[in-house]
Amino acid sequence: MTLLSRAFVAAGLSLALVGAGCSAPTLPGQTPSGPKLSTFENVSPKDAALRINFVPGSVIETRSTFLGFGAKLAAAMAGQNKEGTRVIVITRFAPNETANVEWKLSSKVEGATSIKAREQARKEKKTEPEPVMVDQTALGQVNGINLKDAHSMMLPAYWPETTTGTAFGTSGIWLSKDVFEGYSRSRVATLDFGILDPSIQGAVAKASEFRDALTKLQGQVTKIEERTDVFLLKGEEQPSEWTLKVNGQDVKVEVLKGRTWFGEIVVLNNPQNPLVLKVTLNPATSGVTDLITNFSALKALFGYEVTELKDVQP
């Protein structure tokens, strides 16, 4: 059984115990056994960020911004079924060195029978039936995430549905040690979101609507790259506060905000775990959104936000 599977089983057992009013018995003066989770009472946002550390089994939940809703609001509206939420389980985490993850994404799509029925109705010029949605689950792994010196990310939209997925030398959804040190010290670094990297685009580039949009985005970059460093990451001078759900609590943590030509990022201010909490695709060139067909879909595809962290230890 994979860590991802164990994580879901454990979550189910925990809910069952809570629902039944059960708890593990302890003797007077005895503390419960098991891993110690991070707590955040009476802790400053700066110290709270530093208390967020991952171990195998820690869980990151992310969600794309969808139909104008913020990711956190969309996650809350989805409820316990986690529809549209990417559940990421850490299987290996060596700070500033490497990480491996497993992930699961559940969503609803129109079923093949429904699509066929509506197409047939259109051909016969009849009233189309309502779409019938079915559950769809995607699973995969990303191994060899470079937390040491990578200067490019691999956004979740490009994560492959395979048990042998590789990060292609990228830092995944973290900043590497090299990037974070420069960014936190001088608020300047080099960071490639990886959006236009053909080696990691995979299935996304095969979809015509995204392929065309990516081609046009590449065309815009080609026009300006001789006079503009599109990978220059510039951060705000002062850290900011960010509300993040950690181990079931809403916690204020310290973050660093910044942007490249491609868009904005929000990064947890933690040298051991500089997790990128939010990415928003928002090219700096005026008029890009008008020039690129399906830009709103592209923006939703690549933009994501971390909505919750679980089983985080001090």
Image: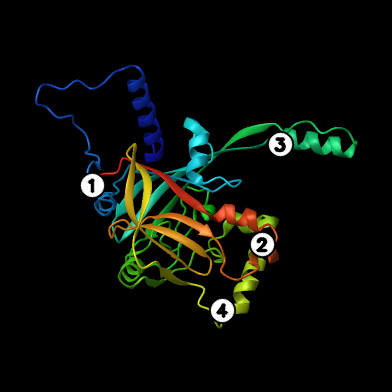
> Mark 4 = which residue?
225
Q: Please, what secondary structure does the residue beneath circle 4 have?
A: loop
Compare residues 112 and 47 and report the one nearer the observer: 47
> Mark 1 = which residue?
43
CA neighbours of label 2 inside 10 A, class few (<14), some (14 to 19), many (20+): many
> Mark 2 = which residue?
213
Q: Amino acid at mark 1?
A: Val
Q: Please, what secondary structure does the residue beneath circle 1 have?
A: loop
User: Distance between the Cα atoms at labels 3 and 2?
Assistant: 26 Å
Q: Please, what secondary structure does the residue beneath circle 3 have?
A: helix
> Mark 3 = which residue?
112
Of the residues under marks 4 and 3, which one precedes in the sequence? 3
Q: Amino acid at mark 3?
A: Ala
User: Distance between the Cα atoms at labels 2 and 1?
Assistant: 45 Å
Callout 2–callout 1 Cβ contact below 8 Å: no
Can residue 105 be seen here?
no
Q: Amino acid at mark 4?
A: Glu
